[in-house]
Amino acid sequence: MGSEDVLKSASTLASYNVLLQVMFRVLTFILNAFTLRFVSKELMGVVNVRLMLLYSTLVFLSREAFRRACLSGEGAGRNWRQVINLLWLTFPLGCVWGVLLVCVWWWVLQAPDPESIPHYVPAVGLFCLSALTELLAEPLWVLAHAHMFVRLKVIAESLAMIAKCLVTVVLVVSAPQWGLYIFSAAQCVYAGFLLLCYVLYFVHFLGSEEAEKKLFPIRHITDLLPSRVDHEPLLNWKLTTLTWSFFKQSFLKQILTEGERYVMTFLNVLNFGDQGVYDIINNLGSMVARFLFLPIEESFYVFFANVLERGQDVRHQKQEEVSMAAEVLECLLKLVLLIGLIISVFGYAYSHLALDIYGGELLSSGAGPALLRCYSCYVLLLAINGVTECFVFAAMSKEEVDRYNLVMLGLSVSFLLLSYWLTWMLGGIGFILANCCNMALRITHSIVYIHRYFLQSECAPLWGLRPHSAVITALGVSSILTGFSEQGEEEEVKRPEVKAEDLIGARDKLAFGTEVKSKTFEVMQECEQAGKVAPSVFSKVRSGSETAFNKPSKRK
């Protein structure tokens, strides 16, 4: 596949990924708004922080390194038998991680109150089971991604997400008392649908005319199982060592990516209710980053990995492909920088309004708007880091990846310490500020690497990080106008101050001149008319002559 074909396929894949992530985020957005009206924020905190952290940790540590290695120039296009054998190691590795993580989640972490949040122990096991189910589809996912099967990815993940949402909505409405079982079942349905879609597609595709036209390297469904070929080793040693390098890096990257959740889970700096609110705002703030920037990073990593030769100096590569990679990198930097600046300007101004529309006073009061304002600025750093690291990981040699692991180790330690300290001082905002500091350091490292990489060529892709003066002027004016607009709206919504004498006057006028409609008063009137004693649970002394208005004598 030529460079232009790879670029076209990567662009198409990125476009479909963006649409797919938009659908995912919108469905999750609506689902959270819906479930908040049926379950407590404490339950949402346990599900979205504690249990989803278990799921993401198990899946990420088991497959991320294999994906990066097998989709790079060392994996794609090589001996697919050895690649598939390597990919099947994700499942036993996931089983090992699953046993370790489940033991930690059961016996090390503090369990929620079983009265308010029951079924915690089986929910942990079910989330682990769903993660292992998803890992079974990993060889199929890598094959589809490497050969740009865009339609398969879109259909499989769309159906899985829709099924998950339907199960969640039906069970939340019909059986809210099931609690954590609802979200555990929904997660298992998601993983099962994902695996089923990939299996059915390849069963239909392999051996077809379309597969023969595309010269697909796998001919039968049994070839997707691990096996040995005569006169060939079971695994590609070079690819295996590259996977090990990425594995060490993925462990550190996971800490950086989910660092605030680890701090919340293991250090108990926030209770489950506050964790639930923070997670909702975090999902709202990161919506654009996840459905727009992440697909771009994943798709163009494949492009850079296929166009550039890993670990080779630019002078020893095809200059046409180097120029194309530099041009694409510059365009991507301009695109994500512009999007990030627009989100920062308008997100900072309208954070309070957005939270008030989405979650009402529960989210718009307190620290919610401040959290979203900080996240709006953090999105700009996410945008730049995604593209720069996408290029760096595709161009680094194995030795450079190993050296970068040491950098990631330092960043991980500093992030955990900084997030704990800032959260102890500032609350949830401390998590976002710590992420900003670490993201800025990662961007600096990537920019230095890219500058050195193209130093011996005429290309200068980092010019994409310099926005045009007209863009800066327009965004500056917009920032001022939106700031005044938001301030005016908050002043209109602000309620007038209520004085003590106003409260007293209002109390005296309550029900003035109107008929009393209290049920107690009606019973007292009926007893008075009948000449009987009004029922009372406070007095046992009755002479038979009491009425509702003639109080009995005090008990001696």
Image (spheres, grey):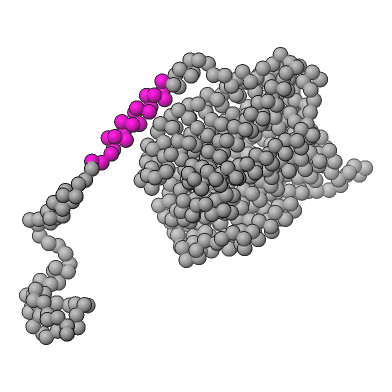
110 and 277: which one is in front? 110
Residue 122 point in image, percent of width and height: 58, 63
Is residue 270 something one can see in this rendering?
yes
Note whether 353 is above or below 251 in the view shown: above
Look at the image and say whether residue 489 sits in the magenta stretch.
yes
Residue 386 point in image, percent of width and height: 61, 32
Which residue shows up at 46% across the image and 40% down it? 371
Note whether 550 is above or below 148 in the view shown: below
Which residue shows up at 11% across the image and 77% down it? 551
Residue 175 point in image, percent of width and height: 46, 61
333 and 104: which one is in front? 104
115 and 178: which one is in front? 115
Look at the image and say whether residue 417 sits in the magenta stretch.
no
Residue 350 point in image, percent of width and height: 40, 33
Note whether 434 is above or below 528 in the view shown: above
Q: Residue furthest right?
A: 231
The N terminus: image quadrant: top right
Note whether 554 is above or below 183 in the view shown: below
Q: To which quarter of the image does residue 207 belong?
A: top right
Q: Say whether residue 288 is left or right of residue 297.
A: left
Q: To which quarter of the image does residue 153 belong?
A: top right
Q: To which quarter of the image does residue 498 belong?
A: top left
Please tell me whether the stretch drawn in magenta is mainly helix, strand or loop. helix
Is residue 190 something one can see in this rendering?
no
Q: Say whether residue 273 is left or right of residue 136.
A: left
Which residue shows up at 43% across the image and 39% down it? 370
Region of the chain picked out in magenta, as a range: 477-496
